[in-house]
Image: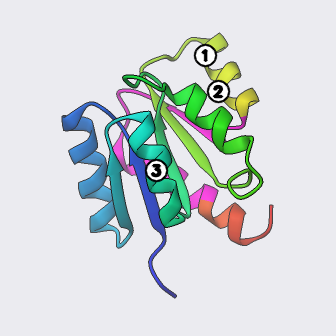
Amino acid sequence: MAAEKILVIEDEEDILALVHYNLAREGFQVSCATTGEEGLKLVAEQPDLILLDLMLPGVDGLEVCRRLRGHEATAGLPIIMMTAKGEESDVVAGLELGADDYVTKPFSPKILLARVRAVLRRRTQGG
C-alpha cells in the first residue's frame, strides 16, 4: 500500500518543521502550506488527511474546514485541527464544524502521530 498523504496547514515554521519531520520519519508523504489559501489549493493533490492550524493568516482554519466540508469532493476528508486555542468553546466549535479530532498546542509528536493513525484507521474501516 502506498504511504498515506498528509497535508499540513500551519503558519508557524518551527511547528511545521517538527510535524513534517515526524510524519515523514513514520513513512507518510507530507505536503505543507503556510496559509489557508495555499492549503485549499493543495487539497487538489488529494491528501488522505489534513492537519489544520486554526489561526492562519488570511483564510483561517475554521473557514478552511467550513469550505472543505461544504464541497462534496472533500466533505469526508479527515481533518485534525492543531491549535493553541484550547478553551472548551474552541474545541466544541472546531468539532462541530466537522473536524475529526482536535489537538491543542503544545502537543507531543507521539500523541499527534497516534491521533493521525487513529483517524486514518477509522477512515479505512469505513467509519
Label 2 vs label 3, nearer the camera: 3
Label 1 vs label 3, nearer the camera: 3
- Disc number for residue 94: 2
Given residues 7 and 114, the one toward you in this image is 7
Given residues 34 and 2, the one toward you in this image is 34
Q: Name the image quarter holding residue 29.
A: bottom left
Q: In this rendering, does residue 98 appear at all?
A: yes
Residues drawn in magenta? 98-119
Q: Position of residue 123 (x, y in %)?
A: 70, 64
> How far, Cα to Cα, is label 2 from label 1?
6 Å
Residues tagged 1 and 3 counted as in contact (Cβ below 8 A)? no
| Disc with the residue nearer the chain's start (1 vs 3) | 3
Q: Is residue 71 left or right of residue 10?
A: right
Q: Name the image quarter holding residue 97.
A: top right
Q: In this rendering, does residue 111 appear at all?
A: no
Give the residue at mark 1: 90
Crowd class of label 1 (few under 14; some 14 to 19; many from 20; radius 10 Å): some
Q: Quadrant of the C terminus?
A: bottom right
Q: Is residue 12 magenta?
A: no
- In the rendered structure, which amino acid carries the disc numbered 1? Asp
- In the rendered structure, which amino acid carries the disc numbered 2? Gly
> How far, Cα to Cα, is label 2 from label 3?
21 Å
Instruction: Name the outermost residue toward the bottom.
Output: 1
Give the residue at mark 3: 41
Q: How many marks?
A: 3
Relative to 64, say whether 120 is above or below: below
> How far, Cα to Cα, is label 1 from label 3?
25 Å
Residues tagged 2 and 1 counted as in contact (Cβ below 8 A)? yes
Residue shown at 31% from the left, 38% from the top: 34
SS class, disc 2:
helix
